Amino acid sequence: MSTPSHDDALAPYDAVLLLSFGGPETPDEVMPFLRRVTAGRDVPEDRLQEVATHYHHFGGRSPINDQNRELRAALEAEVARRGSTVPVLWGNRNSDPYVADTLREARAEGHLRICTVVTSAYSSYSGCRQYREDLAAATEELGVAAVDLHIDKVRPYALHPGFVAVNTERLVEAVAGVSETDLANARLLFVTHSVPEAMDDTSGPGDGEGNLYVDQHLRAGHLIAQGLIERTGTTLEHELVFCSRSGGPRTPWLEPDVNDRIEELAAEGVSTVVVAPIGFVSDHMEVVNDLDREAQETADRVGVRMVRVPTAGTHPLFVEALVDLLQERAAEARDEVVIPARADQGDLRPSVCAPGCCPNLRAAKPALCGSD
């Protein structure tokens, strides 16, 4: 292991951890993966079998791990381009490479100070605290081997100018191929993962007003739509819709569902829907199945043209934004006064989560990278 020099912009960290959700890579892994994801939630077996069909439409392989491999390589290249020697590691919550195994290997190689980037931009239990819980559980699994590990994370980045910029760029590129006639009768649908209403109600700091998850999406969508106007002169009426609901029928989840909204818009005479999945950072299963397959089938059935905007993926603007966040967190760790070069539109979240932030509503669990 090489220790980063004092002039390395990522010092004092000696490793970066890309932490993601994970997914199956063979048909035999699908059901065990789904059982891990839903453990403790009393999800019926028939519901899991139904969700499993989504994966089997794609050969039983989720695209997310390949996308994480590509993002890891892109981050490594950008980190090196900026003159840093810090390696980029990769771990998952729900599939190999599991985060505990990644941390075990990191510790064996002498990496003791690690900064984490999660592949989720928004503030919510499932998008932030649950990853923090996974880090805590992984260090508990390591036992005494984790005693001298110090793990931090970058702040939520939903409204980071780089994340907004890459989603704007993707939207501009997507509508460039749509005629003015079609755009004149189009609606822009910003899509994200639905969560229980109670999770949104409690998203954000414990002493805050809640509903930060939806609020961040609404503000990001407004900025992206405004960027489209500034870049192209095209104004599209826009709204936030949801996909991938997975809870029981008696639990209220965020609505409207993207399929329901496409049907409603068709009935209202809208002929084109531009679907921008700003709630996701890559084209994983919730995008390729729920949008490219199911929403596309709905649009075809009701006679609406659907234009799907790509996610951030490994676009250079996104990769650069993530490394900016890593350098910002490293400066904090060096006890430097950090003033971000570009304000996040009034949503500058802390890198150390406040007490009660985005709580686990089922059970209190230890979580790293927070002050509670």
Image (cartoon, rainbow, N blue to C red):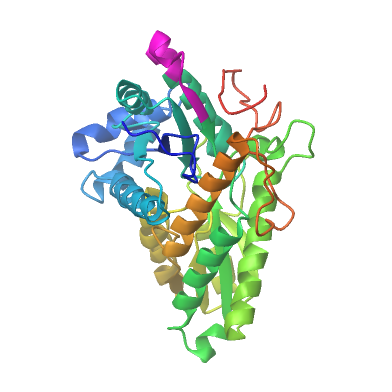
Q: Place residue 129 in its image quadrant.
A: top right
Q: Quadrant of the N terminus?
A: top left
Q: Quadrant of the C terminus?
A: top right
* 163 or 173: nearer the viewer: 163
* 338 or 206: nearer the viewer: 338
Q: Residue at x 37, y 25 (%)?
A: 103
* 157 or 214: nearer the viewer: 157
Relative image position of residue 14 (x, y in whole percent): 42, 34
Total number of numbered discs in the rendering: 0
Residue 14 seen by the camera: yes
Reply above or below: 59 against 177: above
- Left or right side of 204 for 171: left
* 286 or 98: nearer the viewer: 98
Reply above or below: 164 against 232: above
Residue 269 on the magenta segment: no
**Furthest residue toward front:** 6
Residue 248 seen by the camera: no
- Left or right side of 22 for 122: right
Residue range in magenta is 139-151
- Left or right side of 172 for 332: right
Relative image position of residue 222 (x, y in whole percent): 67, 66
Q: Residue at x 63, y 27 (%)?
A: 370
Relative image position of residue 90 (x, y in whole percent): 35, 37
Most common SS among magenta residues: helix
- Left or right side of 372 for 182: left
Residue 147 on the magenta segment: yes
Relative image position of residue 95 (x, y in whole percent): 32, 32
Q: Residue at x 53, y 29 (%)?
A: 132
